[in-house]
Amino acid sequence: MAQDSVDLSCDYQFWMQKLSVWDQASTLETQQDTCVHLARFQEFLRKMYEALKEMDSNTIFERFPTIDQLLAKACWNPFILAYDESQKILIWCLCCLINKEPQNSRQSKLNSWVQGVLSHILSALRFDKEVALFTQGLGYAPIDYYPGLLKNMVLSLASELRENHLNGFNTQRRMTPERLASLSRVCVPLITLTDVDPLVEALLVCHGHEPQEILQPEFFEAVNEAILLKKISLPMSAVVCFWLRHLPSLEKAMLHLFEKLISSERNCLRRIECFIKDSSLPQAACHPAIFRVVDEMFRCALLETDGAPEIIATIQVFTQCFLEALEKENKQLRFALKTYFPYTSPSLAMVLLQDPQDVPRGCWLQTLKHISELLREAVEDQTHGSRGGPLESWFLFIRFGGWAEMVAEQLLRSAAEPPAALLWLLAFYYSPRDGRQQRAQTMVQVKAVLGHLLAMSRSSSLSARDLQTAAGQDTDTDPRAPAQQLIRRLLLHFVLWAPGGHTIARDVITLLAHTAEITHEIIGFLDQTLYRWDRLGIESPRSGKLARELLKELRTQV
């Protein structure tokens, strides 16, 4: 609390100096500086109000002797009054200064002064007396006239901008770059006003023919902040134009999404899906240029976390939302698949793009075999494969969680000899950097574990310890090794699907979850499995009930 008090005092001095500079000069530079700082100043006002409301008037002036000067300077600045919620917060702060029962002339004088400033704020956006008399003569009340006038002005400017866009190189009819820049600057404090939306949209889609961007950087920053905080409603076409012409805003939108995902509950794909759809990024990514930027940022996150399961799951959900948006936008692709996935085989991309929901269940095994053949050709035979190498093919494969997460399930639910194609696919999914020999060893290991599990599924007496031993999970092998993660997945699938697995499920998880990291891994598996079952409509009542119970129990432990 003491540190907060010091910080507020430092901020107070900073903004007092700023307001004095803004008050003494009304040059273009001071206006630009005001616009750049509007969001930060509003945040300061919020903090100020939180402090003022806890004090009486006398204490306020003891703590901040020049508070009246600071608020007065802010109230006479039209940019501040017009910006977002600043007017409202200023009113709150002023009300904190009022003495409900003034004890002396000084307090009465202060009350009168506050009332005067409040009157100024409430009338700041009204026109002069002559205009008011004129509109009354026409039969319009100010409350009806001024919003209509603002709306018409905005529509007129938006129309002029659209014509400017259509005129192209007709320089006689084009709006000058200086005017476009000026309009964008004027819009900064007004971005969140609904009536100004058409003008903001028109500015974003109006492309000039100058070699450099003519709209003001603070305009782009204000628009992006309003989009991220849901304080403006723009059509998706305008958002796409905006992110295409201002890459830093697109990157900030992605970072904002990452921040929301990090701060939310881990391993909850339903919530992740809501965040992703709410970000507008999947819809905007239908444009290949935006898709490539988003794709690259996901790759960086994946590499920096060494392929963390949570990041893979997030990428899979994003891809699903992206494909839904792509289908909604146009049944036939406006852009060739090669523009989205330039370094991968088109035939592989086409197969993976099939939603398992649209493929008969009886064909799932065959489709997975076909995916494995195409991936193996791309990874091990570079003459016909991907220019991007194994990791490029792996990154494409992990995007499509509907197929990627289905392999282990298909292997365990079949009593037949495990197909080599599916064993290869599973080994590649968990260890994409392995060479042929290492991958072959993993396939042998997985085949042996599957054999033990299938034999135990026919046993009349199952124990968690025997299952762990059969799967080789009781050794001193590093539990973080990809092969060990793969085998844990097989065990978890087994206890959910095998007839006798349900009775020992809790014991198996107790033996497996000997670290917090593995506990989170198991929670993630259960959440992803339920999410996928729900999408594909393949949930078994008993397995689904068990998975939900286990998920609930484990979440209470972390």
Image (cartoon, grey):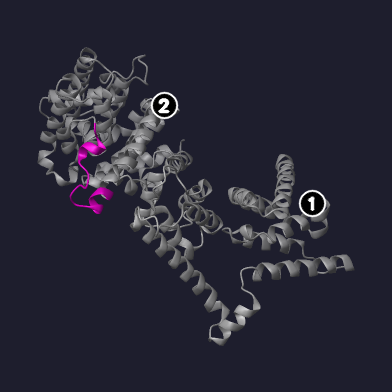
Q: Residues within 10 Å of mark 1 (few under 14, many from 20)?
A: some
Q: Is residue 81 visible?
A: yes
Please say whether residue 48 is one of the residues in the magenta stretch.
no
Name the disc covering residue 92, or none. none
Kind of residue at badge 1 = Phe
The one of 235 and 492 positioned closer to us in this rendering: 235
Q: Is residue 155 above or below residue 225?
A: below
Q: Are marks 1 and 2 in contact (CB under 8 Å)?
A: no
Crowdedness near tag 2: few (<14), some (14–19) or many (≥20) residues, C-alpha within 10 Å? few
| Mark 1 vs 2, N-terminal side | 1
Residue that appears at 38% across and 51% down: 207
From this view, report whether residue 541 is shown above or below residue 96: above
Asked whether, in this view, residue 284 is left or right of residue 80, the answer is left
Q: Which residues are magenta?
A: 325-342
- Distance from the alpha carbon under mark 1 to that under mark 2: 47 Å
Residue 304, labelled with which disc?
2
Task: Residue at 13%, 34% (x, y): give it.
Answer: 365
Using the image as rendered, state which of residue 315 and residue 556 is in the foreground: 315
Task: Report the residue marked by disc 1.
Answer: 64
Percent x, y of residue 308: 38, 29
Query: Residue pushed farthest right?
Result: 104
Q: Residue at x 22, y 44 (%)?
A: 335
